[in-house]
């Protein structure tokens, strides 16, 4: 599948601050952007906030985007970076208020991710504690290395690896009721 280049007319409209072209772009890429943001945030409101910030990056300075390059990968990178900033902002707030809960899990079972629908997966990921969710998304879904994640999140490589391991454990734990329900229904 070929990555699409942003229509030159739309891009020129963005440069000229044309509201109609901004709206067209927003409508074209809202769902795509929201699917990325939902994976990193714990709720729809947070995802919308990050997504709107992503559009504002482009609307405020459209020349940040090179119109000769595919748009989706560029926009994805902008959104992932904004999600990391959102995480850092809320991480500081949660440490100040002591609100973040990071559960421990000792049980491990085979993953049932293969037969899950995308929306189920997003809801499951959203249930992870913030640090786990962010590392899980960056490593598993977006393909960053632990070294890159540590740099983005201002943590150590060991913390990144630990958070990924704990995210996987938590996902297994969250999947247990689903596996148990399947056995009961048989």
Image (cartoon, rainbow, N blue to C red):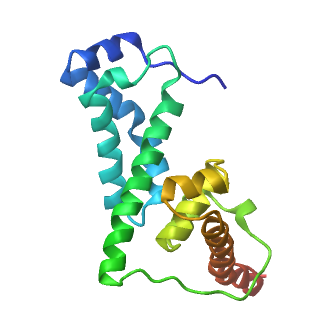
Q: Position of residue 113 (x, y in %)?
A: 71, 64
Q: Where is the C terminus found, in terms of image quarters?
A: bottom right
Q: Where is the N terminus found, in terms of image quarters?
A: top right
Task: Please say if 72 is above or below 183.
Answer: above
Corner quadrant of residue 124: bottom right
Is any atom of residue 50 visible in this view?
yes
Task: Please say if 35 is above or below 126.
Answer: above
Q: Position of residue 116 (x, y in %)?
A: 67, 62
The residue depicted at 76 percent of the width and 70 percent of the height is 111
Q: Is residue 91 left or right of residue 163?
A: left
Q: Is residue 156 left or right of residue 11?
A: right
Corner quadrant of residue 44: bottom left
The residue depicted at 57 percent of the width and 64 percent of the height is 120
Q: Position of residue 100 (x, y in %)?
A: 41, 80
Q: Nearer the viewer, residue 147 or 105?
A: 147
Q: Position of residue 2 (x, y in %)?
A: 63, 22
């Amino acid at each position: 599948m070929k990555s699409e280049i942003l229509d030159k007319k739309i891009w020129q409209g963005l440069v000229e601050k044309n509201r109609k072209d901004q709206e067209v772009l927003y409508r074209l890429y809202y769902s795509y952007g929201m699917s990325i943001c939902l994976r990193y945030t714990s709720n729809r409101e947070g995802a919308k906030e990050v997504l709107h910030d992503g559009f504002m990056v482009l609307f405020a300075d459209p020349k940040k985007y090179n119109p000769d390059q595919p748009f989706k990968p560029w926009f994805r990178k902008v959104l992932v970076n904004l999600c990391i900033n959102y995480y850092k902002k809320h991480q500081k707030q949660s440490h100040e208020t002591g609100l973040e809960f990071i559960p421990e899990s000792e049980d491990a079972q085979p993953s049932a991710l293969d037969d899950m629908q995308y929306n189920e997966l997003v809801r499951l990921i959203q249930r992870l504690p913030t640090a786990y969710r962010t590392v899980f998304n960056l490593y598993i879904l977006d393909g960053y290395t632990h070294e890159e994640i540590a740099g983005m999140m201002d943590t150590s490589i060991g913390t990144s690896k630990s958070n990924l391991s704990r995210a996987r454990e938590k996902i297994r734990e969250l999947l247990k009721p689903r596996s148990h329900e399947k056995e009961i229904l048989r």
